[in-house]
Amino acid sequence: MTVLTIGDRRVGDGADVFCIAEIGLAHEGSLGQAHAYIDLAADTGFDAVKFQTHLPEYESTPQEQFRVRVFPQDKTRRDYWKRTAFEKSQWQELAAHSRERGLVFLSSPFSSEAVDLLLECGVPAWKVASGEVTNRPMLGQMAATGLPLLISSGMSGWAELTRTVDLVRAAGASVGLFQCTSAYPCPPDQWGLNVIGEMKQRFGCPVGLSDHSGTIVPGLAAVALGAVMLEVHIAFSKQQFGPDAPASLEPPQCRQLTDGVRALSAALARPVDKDAQAQHLQPLRDLFMKSAVAARSLPAGHRLTPDDLAYRKPGTGISAWDAEQLVGRRLRRSVPADHFFCFDDLTDEQSAAEEAE
């Protein structure tokens, strides 16, 4: 599998899971809120933040309507893009703040002009929104920079993804893919966790999950299934204004997710050898497992029956598993109750059953 380099981070098998906090437009056009979200992402253990860079005059027309109308102050989507947009200098401030907090700064461009703006902000990779997968000119522009493209697949089938990956690779850029479903919040039957393995097999590239569920469950499950990237929406509260809030993680969930991802990564990086583990745990095996002992005092010459045997801790004698080897043998010497049998206690005389044969 290809390992991507995003800034100073390695992304792929053998590297830590790359956790992206999707801020998107949760800032609602407030520069202060955008900076506050950067701090939230850093404080809760993410590796990167991701915004959306909309330049309305280059991206949209007045004819673009809302899928679901949630903004009473905006007549069209273009009005919404205008209200929530930042100037280039403000984007540069956000990028600098992200880097100061140890975060990778990412933003999805939605026009060629947005690509140019973000390049000036020093983005180390391109996050391609699922609606831009057919934007061949912009894909070519991004690939020509040589930076990796991280592509969301929310609205694409396999053929469309294949041609997009082929285009990017032909231009000499590396690629990572995200399984996602364009539903907010995304219900469990649309998480598509099965796609993660198939993407890895088809394209041989780092694969992640872009999650819109508003819970930590699919993210953790995806990592357990081999995802090496994870993107989730974050919000200070699910009750705040905006279409993505219900599909976002609140601050405590953010920390639960990143802690869980790190724990899973550590576990997956250290596979357990059951045989070696059992050998290492021999002292505990001796302590907790059972040995065959005398159920009562038994005289010398006594032929052992199942009723003569009891099974007690510790497991330092003949294992209860092997106790059948004692039945039918004669005692060489008398033994007290709770005596831990050893094979030296027994004569070599055949059992009654063996003699009958």
Image: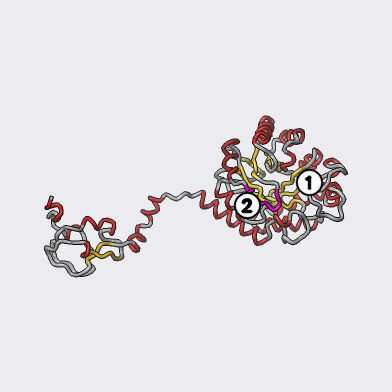
User: Residue placed at 51% from the left, 49% from the top?
Assistant: 269
Place residue 345 in its image quadrant. Answer: bottom left
Report the disc number at residue 188: 2
Q: Is residue 247 magenta?
A: no
Asked if residue 282 lies left or right of residue 114, the reply is left
Task: Classify 78 as above or below 32.
Answer: above
Q: Residue most toward the top?
A: 170
Whole-number angstrom distance, CA of label 1 to CA of label 2: 29 Å
Give the numbered dot on residue 53.
1
Q: Secondary structure at mark 1?
A: strand
Residue 203 percent location from the top left of the image: 60, 36
Q: Which residues are magenta?
A: 183-191
Q: Quadrant of residue 336?
A: bottom left
Residue 105 location, x and y as percent?
71, 48
Across and down, in percent, residue 204 comes to 58, 36
Query: Is 324 situated left or right of 269 in this image?
Result: left
Q: Position of residue 57 (x, y in %)?
A: 86, 42
Labels in figure, total: 2
